[in-house]
Amino acid sequence: MSTTEPIRSKHQVNELTKFYSRKGQTRNHLLIIMALHTALRISDLLRLHWDDVYDFKRSAARETVHLTEKKTGKTKVLSLNKRVTEAVAALFAQNHATPGKSVFINQRTGKAISRIQAYRIVRSASEALEFQHIASCHSLRKTFGYHSWKEGVSPVVIMDIYNHSSFDVTRRYLGITQDEKNEVYLNLDFSV
């Protein structure tokens, strides 16, 4: 069994975020954008309803989401950045969604897409983009942490965002390679 890896290349992440928008597939685009920008588990993403992400009184995407994680039972509040709110608004405009309806709906069944379908959406894009490692929904969660860490976000903050109970789990999520460790050794210079 192989280990799920984060997508380390910013260029590949950028290409992945554009893949479905170029095809006009707004639901799939939002799935990838939200997974990358919120670090939610796919089980929590697929449970989102329009009331969670869209304010019907203001006719605008919400800037924060409140949810209880399925796996941990912990309450989570997360902010949605501009890319996510724009993608929410685009899907809303296309679907004319209603309160209580699933965000990531299967048009055929009228219910939320399955975890398998979400995996296929991510995998298909990574295959079409010819990624070296096939991406999965979990890869997107790990990609959030990896790039946050590379941008200087404290691993302790990332651990809290992930709701991990141990730093060892977060450390594995970050996917720190020997090359990155070597970079630290080689670039540290105390000379004045």
Image (cartoon, helix red, strand yellow):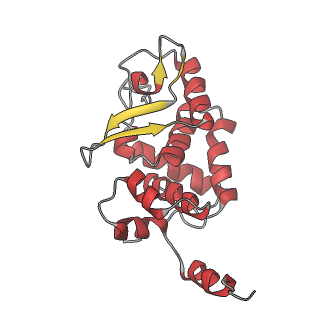
Query: In this orientation, which residue lies closer to the viewer: 137 or 111?
Result: 137
Q: Report the number of numbered marks.
A: 0
* Above/below status of 170 relative to 63: below
User: Where is the C terminus found, in terms of image quarters?
Assistant: bottom right
Q: Position of residue 138 (x, y in %)?
A: 43, 55
Q: Residue at position x 70%, y 57% from top?
A: 11
* Above/below status of 184 relative to 51: below
Query: In this orientation, which residue lies closer to the viewer: 136 or 172?
Result: 172
* Above/below status of 68 relative to 91: below
Q: Looking at the rendering, which quadrant does residue 7 occupy?
A: bottom right
Residue 135 showing in the rendered view: no
Residue 72 showing in the rendered view: yes
Q: Position of residue 51 (x, y in %)?
A: 40, 21
Q: Residue at position x 53%, y 36% from top?
A: 80
Q: Position of residue 47 (x, y in %)?
A: 34, 34
Does residue 63 appear left or right of residue 111 in this picture? right
Q: Residue at position x 66%, y 58% from top?
A: 10
Q: Residue at position x 45%, y 56% from top?
A: 157
Q: Position of residue 130 (x, y in %)?
A: 64, 60
Query: In this orientation, which residue lies closer to the viewer: 77 or 72?
Result: 77
* Above/below status of 157 relative to 132: above
Q: Looking at the rendering, which quadrant does residue 59 occupy?
A: top right
Q: Which residue is at the far left?
A: 73
Q: Which residue is at the far right?
A: 192
Does residue 64 appear left or right of residue 72 in this picture? right
Query: In this orientation, which residue lies closer to the viewer: 39 or 126?
Result: 39
User: Where is the N terminus found, in terms of image quarters?
Assistant: bottom left
Q: Which residue is at the far front?
A: 192
